[in-house]
């Protein structure tokens, strides 16, 4: 097999990897709703342990208001936040919609006793 044949075979493969890498680079993650697996997959230099730390911090302290707040999570620094700025979305966490069939509880008025 000569070099020209090898190049002809490898060129499409290299192109596929380049396109796949570009697709992953364009992916974003909402740090207020994503699970640890998604955060691990999308963010650069954030492995499974740091991704879980982000989820744990969010559960303990509430939703993130900005991407910079990720630096409050142990193991996440401002450099990591800057590397991932285009991948991070800070949105409101999902709230379950109220159902129309939910029972309405009536509260009896309280009597005020004066002495």
Image (spheres, rainbow, N blue to C red):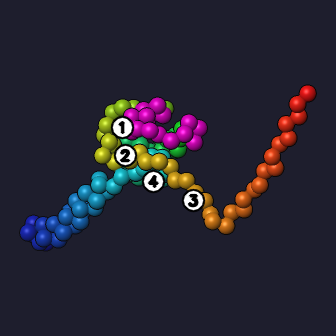
Q: Which residue is mark 1?
A: 81
Query: Which of the marked residues, 2 or 1, is nearer the chain's N terminus?
Result: 1
Query: Which of the marked residues, 1 or 4, is nearer the chain's N terminus?
Result: 4
Query: Which of the marked residues, 3 or 1, is nearer the chain's N terminus?
Result: 1
Residue 99 x %, y %: 62, 63
The label nearer to you, 2 versus 4, is 2
Report if residue 62 lies within the magenta region.
yes
Q: How many numbered discs?
A: 4
What element does badge 1 sit on?
A: helix
Using the image, determine if residue 34 lies above or below residue 58. Answer: below
Proximity of marks 3 and 4: CB atoms separated by less than 8 Å: no
What element does badge 3 sit on?
A: loop
Point out the residue furthest to the front here: 114
Q: Is residue 45 left or right of residue 59?
A: left
Report if residue 80 lies within the magenta region.
no
Q: Which residue is mark 3?
A: 97
Occupied quadrant, residue 82: top left
Query: Which of the marked residues, 2 or 4, is nearer the chain's N terminus?
Result: 4
Proximity of marks 2 and 1: CB atoms separated by less than 8 Å: yes
What element does badge 4 sit on?
A: helix
Q: Residues within 10 Å of mark 1 (few under 14, many from 20)?
A: many
Q: Which residue is mark 4?
A: 38
Q: Residues within 10 Å of mark 3 (few under 14, many from 20)?
A: few
Query: Which of the marked residues, 3 or 4, is nearer the chain's N terminus?
Result: 4
Viewer can see residue 76: no
Mark 3–mark 1 distance (CA, rounded to whole Å): 32 Å
Q: Which residue is mark 2?
A: 88
Quarter of the figure with the N terminus: bottom left
């Amino acid at each position: 097999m000569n070099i020209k044949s090898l190049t002809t075979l490898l060129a499409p493969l290299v192109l596929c990897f380049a396109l796949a890498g570009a697709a992953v680079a364009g992916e974003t993650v909402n740090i207020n709703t994503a699970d640890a697996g998604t955060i691990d997959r999308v963010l650069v230099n954030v492995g499974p342990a740091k991704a879980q730390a982000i989820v744990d911090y969010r559960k303990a302290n509430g939703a993130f208001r900005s991407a910079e707040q990720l630096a409050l999570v142990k193991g996440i620094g401002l450099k990591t936040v800057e590397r991932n700025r285009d991948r991070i979305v800070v949105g409101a966490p999902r709230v379950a919609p109220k159902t129309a069939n939910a029972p309405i509880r009536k509260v009896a008025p309280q009597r005020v006793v004066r002495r």
